[in-house]
Image (tube, grey):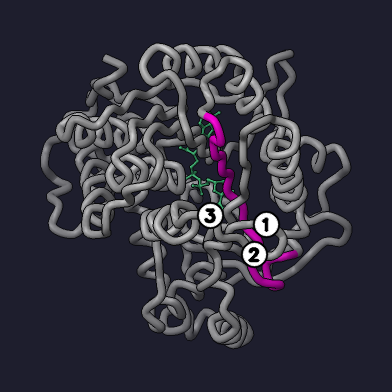
């Protein structure tokens, strides 16, 4: 099959198996260029392991710490006529490279919110690893069906007042004004159900009960805070309520579940499948990229996750801020970076868009998520969409 990108809004409905493989390989090569983390995780479970921050966490765990990993993903394989999801191809490549180096890696494909997948994962850990010492929770989902069969959908809205600001229409390269309406109480409740900490707590308590968590096991979930500019629609918005619940859940896990330490890592704003769907944020990210690249402090998912393990977690005591959160957004939130971003935000328009923001970088990274736009690749060549994930064969 010859595979081309088919972009609809903020989704690409195709993905390139070899391009995804090259992305994973590049992340492994980056991790390999860093010092080995000798006292890092030895056995890890990554929930939401196929894309973005979860995939990068799995790569750092495996290739920097040498950890055996179980990954929970929710992805589709390719067929003769359709490409699989990028997460499927990423996972196939990850396992291929891990197994080639004799690193244990197995994957469970299914809905992380379900009891069945929790049970299947726990059974696999019991059988193959006994226990894990690290659980990363990196699920970003638009909806969740709870075990009683009720479905909840999350929304990206404000709470309280509506909010108007600039956003970018990437298709037409225009800056538009967008007004984000406030979420209803029910929408906020549902967003917390999907993106809050309830499912994370479920995972950890089931795992504890089943005896598959090592003594002093660590669990980390990811959050975002960002600057005032994005607060009405992120930090103070419906998703922010879910993230507040996630932070409360970290405290609840640490205090209620014996021998487990739970942390929130506040990560940098980055282009992933999930963040590209949030109004206002993509314009903020493309300005942020411009500023951070110019100052030489830009990082992608893998640089963030490698630094999380290297500098914040496996350093003989976890480094947090005064509220107990790990701050991987430390560089993004530096006052000089934020000052430059807000100065640009004030003056950015259709006329100066290309010089004020890293639009080319944004678009390239967006395509790369799906394995496209990689330099030196022949996208007119035939490729096999039916790539298997070795442990799921
Ligand atoms: P992503 O879309 O790149 O990855 C999300 C992962 O969750 C994918 O692997 C997906 O397959 C998996 N997933 C979704 N539903 C699932 C389900 N039902 N069962 C199993 N797996 C499922 O997203 P991301 O940006 O890496 O986000 C991961 C976490 O990081 C989220 O909590 C997000 O809020 C947080 N975060 C993201 C950013 C950012 O800018 N991208 C910044 C800070 C924090």
Q: Nearer the viewer, residue 279 or 40?
A: 40
Q: Is mark 2 within 8 Å of ligand 1?
A: no
Q: Quadrant of the C terminus?
A: top left
Q: Quadrant of the N terminus?
A: top left
Give coordinates of residue 288: x percent, y percent: 50, 73
Residue drawn at (40%, 71%) of the image: 298
Q: In front: mark 3 or mark 2?
A: 3
Q: Mark 2 highlights which residue?
A: 321
Residue drawn at (50%, 32%) of the image: 47
Q: Mark 3 highlights which residue?
A: 317
Q: CA distance from mark 2 to mark 1?
A: 5 Å
Question: Mark 2 falls on what kind of element?
Answer: loop
Q: Which stretch did the figure color magenta?
A: 215-231
Question: Magenta segment: does it hold 379?
Answer: no
Q: Are marks 3 and 2 in contact (CB under 8 Å)?
A: no
**In the figure, residue 59 lies in which quadrant?**
top left
Q: Mark 1 highlights which residue?
A: 324
Relative to 178, does residue 275 appear above or below in the rendering? above
Give coordinates of residue 359: x percent, y percent: 42, 70
The disc label shown at residue 207, or none? none
Question: Mark 1 falls on what kind of element?
Answer: loop
Question: Mark 3 falls on what kind of element?
Answer: loop
Q: Would you call the spot at circle 1 few (<14 residues within 10 Å), some (14-19), or many (20 or more)?
A: some
Asked if residue 285 lies left or right of residue 310, the reply is right
Q: Would you call the spot at circle 2 few (<14 residues within 10 Å), some (14-19), or many (20 or more)?
A: few
Give coordinates of residue 296: x percent, y percent: 37, 79
> Can see residue 256?
yes
């Amino acid at each position: 099959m010859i595979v081309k990108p088919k972009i609809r809004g903020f989704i690409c409905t195709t993905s390139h198996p070899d391009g995804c493989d090259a992305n994973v390989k590049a992340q492994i090569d980056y991790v390999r260029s860093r010092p080995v983390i000798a006292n890092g995780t030895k056995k890890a479970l990554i929930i939401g392991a196929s894309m973005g921050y979860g995939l990068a966490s799995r790569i750092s765990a495996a290739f920097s710490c040498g950890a055996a990993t179980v990954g929970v993903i929710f992805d589709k394989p390719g067929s003769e006529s359709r490409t699989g999801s990028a997460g499927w191809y990423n996972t196939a490549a990850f396992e291929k490279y891990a197994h080639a180096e004799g690193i244990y890696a197995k994957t469970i494909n299914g809905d992380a919110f379900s009891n069945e997948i929790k049970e299947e994962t726990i059974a696999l850990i019991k059988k193959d690893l006994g226990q894990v010492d690290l659980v990363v929770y990196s699920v970003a989902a638009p909806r969740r069906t709870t075990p009683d069969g009720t479905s909840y959908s999350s929304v990206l809205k404000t709470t309280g007042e509506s909010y108007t600001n600039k956003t970018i229409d990437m298709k037409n390269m225009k800056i538009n004004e967008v007004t984000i309406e406030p979420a209803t109480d029910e929408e906020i409740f549902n967003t917390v159900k999907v993106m809050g900490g309830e499912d994370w707590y479920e995972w950890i308590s089931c795992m504890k009960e089943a005896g598959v968590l090592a003594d002093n096991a660590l669990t980390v979930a990811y959050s975002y805070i960002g600057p005032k500019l994005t607060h009405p629609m992120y930090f103070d918005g419906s998703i922010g309520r879910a993230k507040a619940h996630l932070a409360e859940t970290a405290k609840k896990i640490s205090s209620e579940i014996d021998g487990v330490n739970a942390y929130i890592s506040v990560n940098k704003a980055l282009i992933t499948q999930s963040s590209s769907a949030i109004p206002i944020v993509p314009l903020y990210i493309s300005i942020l990229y411009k500023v951070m690249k110019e100052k030489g402090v830009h990082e992608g998912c893998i640089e963030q996750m490698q630094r999380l393990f290297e500098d914040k977690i496996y350093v003989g005591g976890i480094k947090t801020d005064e509220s107990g959160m790990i701050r991987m957004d430390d560089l993004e939130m530096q006052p000089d970076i934020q000052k430059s971003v807000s100065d640009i935000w004030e003056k950015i328009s259709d006329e100066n868009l290309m010089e004020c923001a890293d639009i080319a970088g944004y678009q390239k990274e967006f395509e790369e998520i799906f394995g496209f736009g990689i330099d030196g690749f022949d996208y007119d060549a035939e490729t096999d969409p039916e790539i298997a994930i070795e442990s799921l064969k």
